[in-house]
Amino acid sequence: MYRIFVESHFTAAHRLRGYEGQCGRLHGHTWKVRVEVESRQVDAIGISMDFKELKSLVDAPLEKLDHYHINEIPPFDAENPTAENLSRFIYREVKNRLPGGVSVASVTVWESEKYGVSYSEP
């Protein structure tokens, strides 16, 4: 099994509804994102998934969030834009764009240098 990953980031504002504390107020982050995919095979030249292609697939959902107030972007207009929910959103967006033979292993979203969440599905 090959695990291929790319890292990217996006900057946006959000607030956590129902949170008692500073995060309940509008604030911003530069989120770091790592997407890992898996493949059992390589092509004729030995590549399981081109890094540039994966980066493009990861950038698509990030562009929906970058430099926006995330609480105004579906599905986060209805659910809290927590790191947990953001990682699941990015996971599913990338999953829907992947070519056959490649699957998402995990998505990790860092809210800061020291705090982050990884999401995967069985």
Image (tube, rainbow, N blue to C red):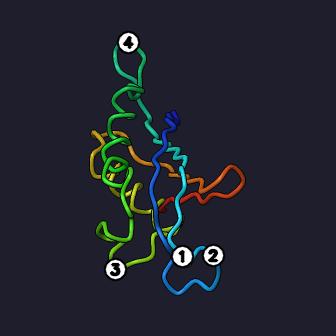
Seen at 30% across and 66% down, the residue is 73
Label 4 or label 3, whichever comes before in sequence order: 4
Label 1 or label 3, whichever comes before in sequence order: 1
**Residue 78, disc:** 3
**Badge 3 local density, few (<14 within 10 Å), some, or many (20+)?**
few
Examine the rendering and report whether any part of residue 95 can be seen. yes
Label 4 or label 1, whichever comes before in sequence order: 1
Label 1 sits on residue = 25
Q: Pick the residue in front: 6 or 23.
A: 23
| Count of marks overlaid on the render | 4
Q: Nearer the viewer, mark 4 or mark 1?
A: 1
Q: Nearer the viewer, mark 2 or mark 3?
A: 2
Label 2 or label 4, whichever comes before in sequence order: 2
Label 2 sits on residue = 22
| Image height of 22 relative to 36, above or below | below
Seen at 50% across and 70% down, the residue is 26
Residue type at mark 2 is: Gln
Label 4 sits on residue = 45
Q: Nearer the viewer, mark 1 or mark 3?
A: 1
Verify CB contact (< 8 Å) between mark 2 and mark 1: yes
- Return the x and y of residue 34 as percentages of the image width and height: 53, 44
| Image height of 5 relative to 43, above or below | below
Examine the rendering and report whether any part of residue 1 can be seen. no
Gap between marks 1 and 3, in whole Å? 17 Å
